[in-house]
Image (cartoon, coloured by chain):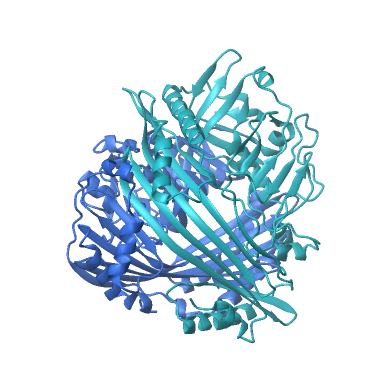
Chain colours: A cyan, B blue
Amino acid sequence: MIDIKRLLESNPAVDGWRITEKATASYELFFVHKELETVRATDTVDTGVTVYVDHDGKKGDSTFAVYQSMTEADIKKKIDAAVRRARLVFNEPYTLPQGGTLEAALPTNMAEEEPKALACRIADAVFAADTLTGGSINACEIFLYRDTLHVTNSRGVDKTQRMHRVMIEAIPTYTTDKESVELYEDHRFTSFDPARVTAEIAARMQEVKDRSLAVKPQTPMTVHVVLRPQEIRELLCNLADDARYAAVYSHANLHKLGDDLQPGGDGDKLTLTLKGILPGCERSSYFDADGLALRDTCLIRNGVVESYYGSSRFGQYLGIQEPSGDLPSCLSVAPGTLREAEIKSAPYLECASLSGLQVDLYNDYIGGEIRLAYLWDGQKKTPVTGISMSGKLSEALSSLRLSEKTTVEGAYEGPEKMLLRNMAVL
Amino acid sequence: MPFSAYLNGKRDDCAALVQALSAHFRYVSVLGTDVHAAVIRADRKSSAVQDGRGECGFVVKMHDGQSFFEYSLDDISGDPEALAARILQAVQVDARLQGRMISAEVLKDEPLRQDFVREVDFADFSDEELLGVCRELSETLLKKDAHVLNAIAMVQPYLVSKLFVTQNRQLTQHYGWANGYLMVVYNDGRMVQARHVEGADQLREIIANLKAHTDSVIDLARHLTRATPIEPGVYDVITDSSISGLIAHEAFGHGVEMDQFVKDRALAKQFMGQYVASPITNMHDGAAATHSVASYFFDDDGVLAHDTQIIRDGILVAGLSDLASAAQLGTAPTGNGRRDSYKRKAYSRMTNTFFESGKDKLEDMIASVKHGYMLFETNNGMEDPKNWQIQCTAEYGIEIVDGKLTDHYVSPVVMSGSVPELLKSISMVSDGFQVIGSGMCGKGYKEWVRVSDGGPNLKVRVKLG
């Protein structure tokens, strides 16, 4: 093992440095129907080195990758090249995070079990949902990862974080005499709960059956649209991205501190917090790429932009005393007041599967192609497909409603449902 | 710039590992990758010169006459027998799954030893020169209009070296590609972003084209500030090459990736030999089909690049396969086995995907539209190969009234609907042709590879919202 730290410290032109090492071991199973097509394993390390050079009253930096193939002489040359590159960069001065050691593991129940046995148990949990007559899981990919992330820098940061995480991609399919339909589904977790995996995929199996029964409703229509957690998160991630220190610094953010995102609305006011750690979420982290400890930050409170967030460097540029750290997109949303009975008091369309929610802050747009939704006409729910919905984002935000009932799913904790009023459906 | 000296020095190690593992498997290959990327960027307040997303490592693929096994690692040096033992241990399967392995044909290992090189001009430009170009572009854009809040100029060259070794085959390839970007943040009371993207294997060409587009990107920003949402409806639409390519990619490209055939995940499997598009429609994919970002010489399974005609005169005639899916389907692989990196599995993936040119003049196509839109610039898209629904988003559209382009811009524009309805609605195909080599394509929501797509202008009838 080459001592990169020693090479950096022995180069007088280097004023500061950061080394990020991520070691990943994986075990992966790829099923075609219920048969095993491919077994994979990986054992790799990604190493990134950032060199900082103070020059001409400015600060330059440059990052390079270190490969296992490199010799000590190769790395010395890369450091010299990075110094040259950093001298070309004239950024405003900033300081690197100072000090702090950590040796932590994110909570998991998967640390002790041998990967091949655990992968087999996960496969069992997936295929236990494959019991619906006419239904099948046509493909399933299971990825088990063990990550060790280590960040050190020239100012004494030395932090290590270990994580066990799983990603399952399962494709529930339903086949009739006339056609065969599918829905895409992925599950990501850091602790394995077989019953939850089976239940979630079984629910998706039922939905794919509904897709086979789905009809194209009479269009165009204007109707309330109900979003579920995945799409709620997608929508709110757009608002969160707009609040990055870097976006503010580069004049690219639309909403400023104190802006009311829901003016004049009579809906539920939005309170959105970014968190470093969400239970069971693979995006969770104790620190960011600079090794800065993450501080949970409320970005929007009662519909008003309250804070920005981001890395130490851009935080310093904005004069932030204690930057939040570059928080992962783990979203926590305060519950609203909407109850199921109220949702059902008027016709609505509940989206179960979209091609992808399209949100455009600049053009004040929200929309998407709906692969499966349930249309409630006041008396009965009908599965529908072949439609798309759209509306003005500002109007949708102003009048949105959030359910009282909450859930935790992946990188989201908050209301189970969001109701957007009077969307155009075609 | 030559082929990677590092990989060149690993030929014998790869061959030794293949030999060691051949005692346990009926087919063994090793793919070595050494990819170097750079990002040079400047905006109003900051700049960067650093490595981009590169990779350097190896992936070993094994087949035992039943299933496939793969192992990814950073370095292949050392005792090949010990490494083979480590790999065998790592890819073991739990006893309860051993009765559930597939059975696929043994892969052919046809002899070939060849080195492929395509030269680029990247070495002619220093970091300093490229950063200077980016700074100049950013400053030029900022000076053009006081409403420009920020202007970002970026160049991203990358160089690929790959080594592929089996018992009978030893291939190397070395090529490069670069992308260039301009983006302005513009606010004249309404804030918008406007972009321009370039792709080529010569930096000289990219720099010249970026310089030539500074006026047009500002002009686009000015128009976008006045853009309105589109009234949802079904319209006659003329596509630019980028949107034609997006349709090719999302509508049928993903639908004919044959690993989806194996999983019964693609409706196209049942439509081989049938009309799926209007009879004036012809569509291709292939690393050898045109010269763009995905024009490699052999794929990540060591299969030489192809030009595959997917749709001929409206009839679906062929799909795209990697080695594993071709083995399971009993077909010949088409050179479409691609990996996100050496750390990831090879899947059937698109390369350069496009419609063939037709005979119509663009001006005649626009003149034929009573009321509709011309759509420009891909934003994103999403496939649905099983159910043939698509969603494609264009950055903007321009309204056509009585056969003439107006000054009315709409943005964004989401095109959605049924794939066969869309493709069968193609009524005119222009004689122009452009392939845009700046795209990244995922499979589902992962496995990103560089792709291009494009073609001529198309006239279609489609739902916009």
Q: Is residue B411 above or below residue A399?
A: below
Foreground: B261 or B414?
B261
Foreground: A63 or B43?
A63
Say whether residue A115 is visible: yes
Q: Is residue A222 above or below residue B239?
A: above
Say whether residue B369 is visible: no
Q: Is residue A183 above or below residue B29?
A: above
Image location (x, y in percent) of residue A283: 59, 50
Image location (x, y in percent) of residue A349: 58, 25
Left or right: residue B280 compared with residue A239: left
For image coordinates 56% across by 24% down, the residue present is A220
* Quarter of image, res B399: top right
Q: Is residue B157 above or below residue B452?
A: below
Image location (x, y in percent) of residue B297: 30, 65
For image coordinates 51% across by 34% down, the residue present is A196
Image location (x, y in percent) of residue B175: 37, 70
Quadrant of the rendering where the C terminus of chain A is positioned: top right
Which residue ends up furthest to the top in the rendered image? A379
Q: How many marks?
A: 0
